Amino acid sequence: MRRSVLGGDPVGRIGDKFAAVLQDIRSVDNAEAVARRIAAAAPARIGIAVAAPGEYGPDDLLDRAAMALQQARLRPDGARWACFEPGMTGGTPLAEELRVAVGEGQLRLVYQPIVGLPDGGLAGVEALVRWAHPRRGTLDPDAFVPLAERIGIIGDLGRWVLEQASAQAARWQRRMPALQLSVNVSPRQLDDDRFAGQVLRILERTGLFPGNLVIEVTEGAVIGEPASVAQLAVLSNAGIRIALDDFGTGYSSLRYLARLPVDVLKLDRGFVAELDGTSRGSAVAQAVLRLGQILNLDTVAEGVESEAQARELTLLGCQKAQGYHYARPLSPDQFQRWLPTGDLSRYEAEIWGPEV
Ligand code: C2E
Ligand code: CA
Ligand code: CA
């Protein structure tokens, strides 16, 4: 490799790969000429990335070279090099990156307030996962949670979310003892019969009270899944609350519902979006909320984006709401400002009585 580049150009080893920095190379053609020389001298695959002075930093340049290398490995035409192009996605396929991301701390949690109706006072918070991808920016769960389920790492991801959110909420709890933390759990997590035990141990470790945790599952996760229901029953007996997410979109099997260990119905945002002041628009919302009342469940409307929706939901007897009308998902620091300020010791005195 050294013989293939100019004397002043550094060549070195980075992990299990080698890199050369071709200074003043000026054009992609020139870089390809060097790659051709290297390829003639050694049985290597080569990824090329070219940057104008100051265009991007060394890490980005290396990332782009790595993506190009991935392309070079896949080339059908026998050429052993490839040059980075803007459209290139993930050097390593997303799945491989996701495996690494969970272990390397690339996941983040954002927190969306859940408020009481009609007053809008803080009642709880839902933890929502994000992937701070090193090249693609922040990814929403739709872009990687289904992938995590497919490749069998949703258990690791879910444990990380629970641990992180519980530790965070345990600290917030000191300022607001009644704060409810909602965490989303995938059906695939319930397939693992160690799940309930893991949740209880996380609560023990983080100091979050079971009564302050809400596990959100979709109906599909539990209908016809007795083993999953048994795990939820264990959690429910420990004082953890269970919410049915996206309610109204799935089976909505009324017979099952009455028997499930469920405490909360979350009205899917699709039905909130249909609210328009008419009885047709509110039909499903009304049915779900009435069902909640009959079964004595807490009801939370998702995706509330306007004052009119909030008012209509209040009239329909909905107890809580969540949505952009109140707040977008927030960073922990931003959410913190939603907590009652006030004197911590006052809350502590309320729970444990005045010091003697
Ligand atoms: P979800 O449980 O229904 O979460 C609510 C979603 O609605 C969030 O999207 C939130 O940002 C969005 N949202 C909140 N308010 C509004 C609003 O007023 N209007 C509209 N249009 N949308 C609103 P997000 O964060 O992209 O999450 C998408 C889904 O990904 C979640 O849906 C949940 O099913 C799943 N998810 C999120 N975090 C986790 C996690 O830690 N584990 C698992 N297994 N799934 C997760
Ligand atoms: Ca949810
Ligand atoms: Ca939902």
Image (tube, helix red, strand yellow):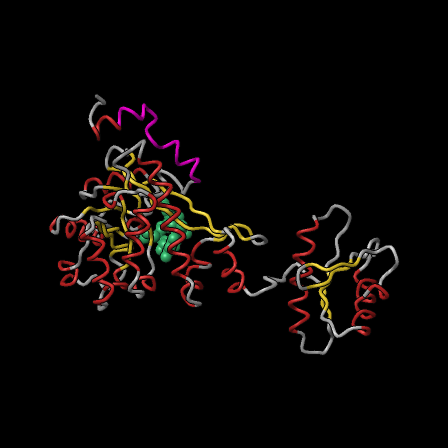
How far from the left and from the top, in percent, is residue 104? 52, 53
Q: Quadrant of residue 284?
A: bottom left
The residue depicted at 35 percent of the width and 37 percent of the height is: 171
- Residue 112 position, x and y percent, is 37, 42
Residue at 20% over, 48% down: 239
Q: Residue placed at 58% from the left, 64% from the top?
A: 92
Q: Is residue 238 left or right of residue 88?
A: left
Magenta-colored stretch includes residue 333: yes
284 with respect to 199 (left or right):
left
**How many callouts does the rendering have?**
0
Residue 217 occupies quadrant: bottom left
Vertical placement of 93 versus 266: above or below? below
In the picture, the quarter occupied by the C terminus is top left
Find the magenta span and give its range.
331-347
Q: Looking at this rendering, what residue extends furthest in the right direction?
A: 7
**Of 8 and 274, the residue lying toward us:** 8
